[in-house]
Image (cartoon, rainbow, N blue to C red):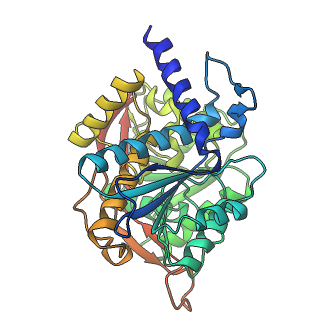
Amino acid sequence: MKRRTYIYLRYCLLINLAILLFGSKVFAQDNNSGVKKVVILAPLYLDSAFDDNGYKLGSTNIPKMYLPGLDFYNGAMMAVDSLQKEGIEMEVWVFDTKKTGTTPLQLSQEVEAVHSELIIASFTNSVEQKVFAEFAFNHNIPLVSATYPNDNYISANPFFLMINSSLKTHVEAMYKYLQRAYPVAKYVYVTRKGILEDKIQSMFTEAGKKTYPINYKSILMPDDFTAAQLLPLLDSTKQNVIICGSLDEKFGNLLLKNLESANSYPCTVMGMPTWDGLKPAFRNANDKMEIIYSTPYQFNKADIAIVNITDKYKSTFFARPTDMVFKGFENMYHFSKLLVKYNGDILNNLSDISFRISNNYRFEPVKLSITSQVPDYIENKKLYFIHVAKGVVKSVN
């Protein structure tokens, strides 16, 4: 019964979201010059869900491609509700980045008409990011990129805030973490053929040049490599640290599968940031294996704010919220509060943690070239390292 109610409620929410096809103001207490205006950009795919005859997806399920954007929106709207209860005067405008027949440039022209003071975005590709990053720079509007971990086409833009840290930041932090935690381990760097894999390995090599280097052996494996190819590289008398040098999900899955039966080899597997959603990481039963991966978002289930968000979401939708719900809530609440407190001057007050929900953001200016006169963007450099053993989160560092 709960499942049917959950689907019905989300179906009703999509019906309500249909009004957002052309951008809609979803909350305003007063319409005066003191009211702050915030724009939310999210991939809602509303044109794919509705036509002239109404809702067209059916009532039994919602395709997976809709869920991240919808959950991000849900979280942001829950934050709007909290702000409203605190008496915050604000207008929030929501725009669907997947609006059919509308290019990112055309959508930016619609956003321009709002005259907002803050943009919070869940981008899905570099084109969207490029257009709105340029828009933010040209209009001096802070743009919070909440979910897209990429700096493609971003340069000389101090108005661009990257919350979901770049791959380079992850690799550098991973290198330093391994140095501190496993100074005498046997290191094996496992990778595959690929342009991105070459880039990751180059980042790893460069990270070693900034500090004392890790002594590791790099192994190029085929996509169908076996345990018989992998295990001879390990040492049963030492702590083995296996570093996965690929974002490819199948490759990561195969690496964990081949190590699962290696009970005679104490090993730590350092994965990529994408491993947060890798199911084998939470099913592995090897008693002697620990899995570690980095993430800029860590939502502690014991935090009172997370408990309250979870309870509210469950009471509304009869389901547990995903990380995208928390990301939508945290970014909407945190940056809106900064916007109000500092009268729009967010960029000079990013170190203020007064409105922390679950994550301790640490913003640093990034210069991609030594000749850069201004930051190319502002990045959240705070990462958490999640330790998983026998399918259970053991610790967070």
List x then y, in percent, for residue 106.
72, 62
List x then y, in percent, for residue 77.
41, 43
Q: Above or below — where is 291 with respect to 91?
A: above
**Residue 165 in sight:** yes
Give the left or right position of residue 214, taking residue 134 as reference: left
List x then y, in percent, for residue 174.
44, 58
Instruction: Give residue 322's quadrant in the image.
Output: top left
Q: Which residue is pictured at 75% across the width and 31% down the height?
A: 52
Q: Above or below — where is 37 with respect to 211?
A: above
Give the left or right position of residue 107, taking residue 41 as reference: right
**Residue 292 in sight:** no
Q: Which residue is pictured at 59% across the width and 63% down the height?
A: 111
Q: Nearer the viewer, residue 49 or 196?
A: 49
Q: Above or below — where is 269 with respect to 155?
A: above
Q: Nearer the viewer, residue 5 or 151?
A: 5
Q: Nearer the viewer, residue 300 or 268?
A: 300
Q: How many marks?
A: 0
In the image, farthest residue toward the top: 1
In the image, farthest residue toward the right: 101
List x then y, in percent, for residue 91.
42, 57
Instruction: Give residue 319's quadrant in the image.
Output: top left
Name the quadrant of the N terminus.
top left
Q: Which residue is pictured at 52% across the width and 30% down the height?
A: 13
